[in-house]
Image: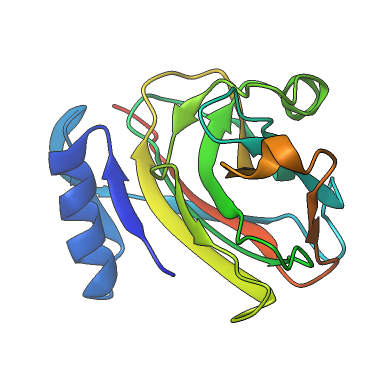
Amino acid sequence: MGQFTIRRGAAGAALFVVALLAGQTFFTTETNARRDQPAAPQAFNSGSNSELVTLLPVTKSGTPDIHRVVYCVDIGTVPAPGSIIYATAELEVTSDIASYPPLVSGHIVLVESCEAAVATPGTVTGTDITEANGENCSYAVQHHCTFVKSGVLVVGNTSRHFVALVMHAASGYAAWRLGDVVKVEPDYGRLGVIVWFWSGG
């Protein structure tokens, strides 16, 4: 399952993506109309065995989801509005629930703090880099389910930022089987981020 979403500043981000695919190193954004402004890309990675949780509790569909931060990366302080974040994440989960296939969903989010996001697992607030979606993980068909997500975000402020992969699991059958969980496989994925820091001017 793959996904590529442009979020915020869509016109400028679209020009950036076209330039990136063409192998260029210059781009234009909506926040600064000057052309050929050089980008200074920096790469960040959650690293090996960087999963912050091992289990995703399955909640009943229609009730509040229990979100879990699986990966989180500190990208530091953005020097000027208009900087561009490209984030991609891969994750493998395992469902041993034979009676029903839980819906496993998630999204990549720009958050203010990894610690705060991890400490409030019920609801993780932030700016979406990708849309929140997922798929049913069937014990009979797949057992192991792999999720791949990627997206682009144009940053509108200069505060310190963190990028997180947030996941949850749900099913209408969870009310009759309390305590069901989906396992997050260790070291089967990671979160990677590339930031083109906009220097302004």
Q: Quadrant of the C terminus?
A: top left
Where 136 sits versus 78, above or below? below
Point 52% across, 44% down: residue: 108
Q: Nearer the viewer, residue 18 or 41?
A: 18
Point 55% across, 52% down: residue: 103
Q: Is residue 73 visible?
A: no
> Residue 118: x, y in percent?
79, 28
Point 26% across, 32% down: residue: 8
Q: Nearer the viewer, residue 114 or 21?
A: 114
Where 201 sits versus 49, above or below? above
Q: Is residue 95 visible?
A: yes
Where 99 sits versus 41, above or below? below
> Residue 120: x, y in percent?
76, 19
Number of numbered discs: 0
Q: Please, which colouring scheme is shown? A: rainbow
Left or right of residue 178: residue 199: left
Left or right of residue 197: residue 162: right
Residue 3 occupies which quadrant of the picture? Answer: bottom left
> Residue 34: x, y in percent?
14, 37
Q: Residue furthest front?
A: 176
Q: Residue furthest bottom?
A: 141
> Residue 95: x, y in percent?
74, 65
Residue 84 occupies which quadrant of the picture? Answer: top left
Q: Quadrant of the N terminus?
A: bottom left
